[in-house]
Image (cartoon, grey):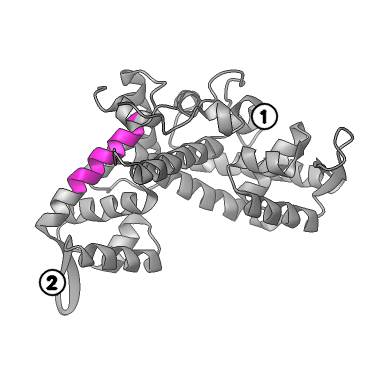
């Protein structure tokens, strides 16, 4: 029996009120995609049927197992460098995989004083199962796209990944839509944070300012737009207040509710941030043509439920519902 474990994005992620500028920002679209994947995986994990989602740590496991399968034994450091996973996370991943018998330590053939990690037979089977589940989630999240459109989205994400230096990934990962979207979202957010740091901003604060420049909304509504929980939203608004970028005001319609508004300083910060984001976007997406960039944005908008009522995405330049079971038998 089909279960609905992934609710429509309009229902609970505020898609109908998302400002057009935010809905055209690829970083936001990739984050939204990742959040929907995480929610689907969590709900599947709790379901009795166990249809099989693929959580974030399992994507990392898939990456490690795929690399070992294709390239042979590697040290933990080599794995961390190739996959851009921080060292402490990699240590935990390897401990987990080793405890399950999916990888084993062997003497490094190039230096007998060191150990390398080798894939066990159990790891081969685990990698195959994780890839199946990752593909299933990818199909569920792109159910609004046709089969050729889904394939095109996957190719565009892979092209962007190659442009960002991920050109030596094992072949099982290069065609995995869920991995590509997740990895690129993390890479883009880190990249954007570094560009915005001189202003005292990061990507999340910047997107908050963009939202508040076009909407009067409450604290909870802002959190809904940003796809974060109440505690994280309070912390974020406190940070923006300390920057002098936003202020809380009592709502005229409901005195129990505080509306968030940009201050004069907030608008100036946003103007400065726009210039930095334009330059950062040009560098990050430089491997894509303008047409490919617009096509990728439009496909991502439709995939996450923001394909209607948003303006056609323009590349910034420096000058200016159904669960996994519902898609199991689909191509």
What span is in magenta? 127-139
| Residue 281 x %, y % | 56, 40
Disc 1 element: loop
Marks 2/1: CA–CA distance: 53 Å
Q: Which residue is mark 1?
A: 19
The majority secondary structure of the magenta stretch comes to: helix
The quarter of the displayed image where residue 261 is located: top right
Q: Is residue 8 left or right of residue 222?
A: left
- Is 65 in front, or is 109? 65
Q: Is residue 32 magenta?
A: no
Q: Is residue 137 magenta?
A: yes
Please tell me the numbered disc located at residue 106: 2
Name the residue located 40 percent from the left edge and 38 percent from the top edge: 160
The quarter of the displayed image where residue 21 is located: top right
| Residue 197 x %, y % | 65, 56
Residue 263 in sight: no
Q: Locate the C terminus by quadrant.
A: top left
Mark 2 or 1 closer to N-term? Answer: 1
């Amino acid at each position: 029996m089909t279960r609905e474990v992934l609710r429509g994005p309009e229902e609970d992620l505020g898609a109908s009120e998302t400002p057009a500028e935010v809905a055209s920002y690829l970083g936001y679209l990739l984050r939204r995609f990742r959040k929907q994947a995480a929610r689907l995986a969590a709900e599947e994990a709790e379901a009795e049927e166990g249809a099989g989602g693929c959580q974030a740590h399992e994507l990392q496991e898939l990456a490690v197992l795929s690399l070992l399968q294709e390239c042979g034994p590697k040290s933990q450091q080599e794995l961390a460098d190739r996959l851009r996973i921080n060292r402490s996370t990699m240590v935990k991943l390897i401990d987990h995989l080793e405890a399950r018998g999916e990888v084993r330590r062997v003497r490094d053939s190039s230096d007998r004083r060191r150990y390398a990690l080798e894939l066990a037979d159990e790891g081969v089977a685990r990698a195959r199962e994780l890839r199946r589940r990752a593909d299933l989630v990818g199909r569920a999240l792109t159910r609004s796209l046709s089969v050729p459109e889904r394939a095109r989205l996957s190719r565009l994400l892979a092209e962007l990944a190659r442009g960002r230096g991920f050109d030596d990934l094992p072949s099982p990962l290069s065609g995995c839509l869920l991995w590509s979207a997740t990895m690129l979202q993390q890479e883009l957010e880190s990249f954007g944070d570094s560009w915005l740091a001189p202003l005292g901003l990061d990507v999340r604060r910047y997107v908050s300012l963009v939202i508040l420049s076009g909407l009067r909304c409450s604290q909870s509504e802002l959190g809904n737009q940003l796809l974060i929980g109440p505690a994280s939203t309070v912390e974020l608004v406190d940070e923006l207040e300390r920057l002098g970028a936003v202020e809380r005001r009592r709502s005229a319609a409901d005195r129990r509710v505080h509306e968030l508004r940009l201050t004069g300083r907030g608008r100036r910060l946003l103007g400065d941030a726009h210039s930095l984001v334009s330059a950062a976007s040009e560098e990050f997406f430089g491997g894509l043509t303008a047409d490919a960039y617009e096509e990728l944005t439009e496909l991502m908008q439709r995939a996450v439920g923001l394909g209607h009522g948003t303006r056609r995405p323009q590349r910034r330049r420096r000058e200016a519902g159904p669960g996994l079971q519902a898609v199991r038998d689909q191509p």
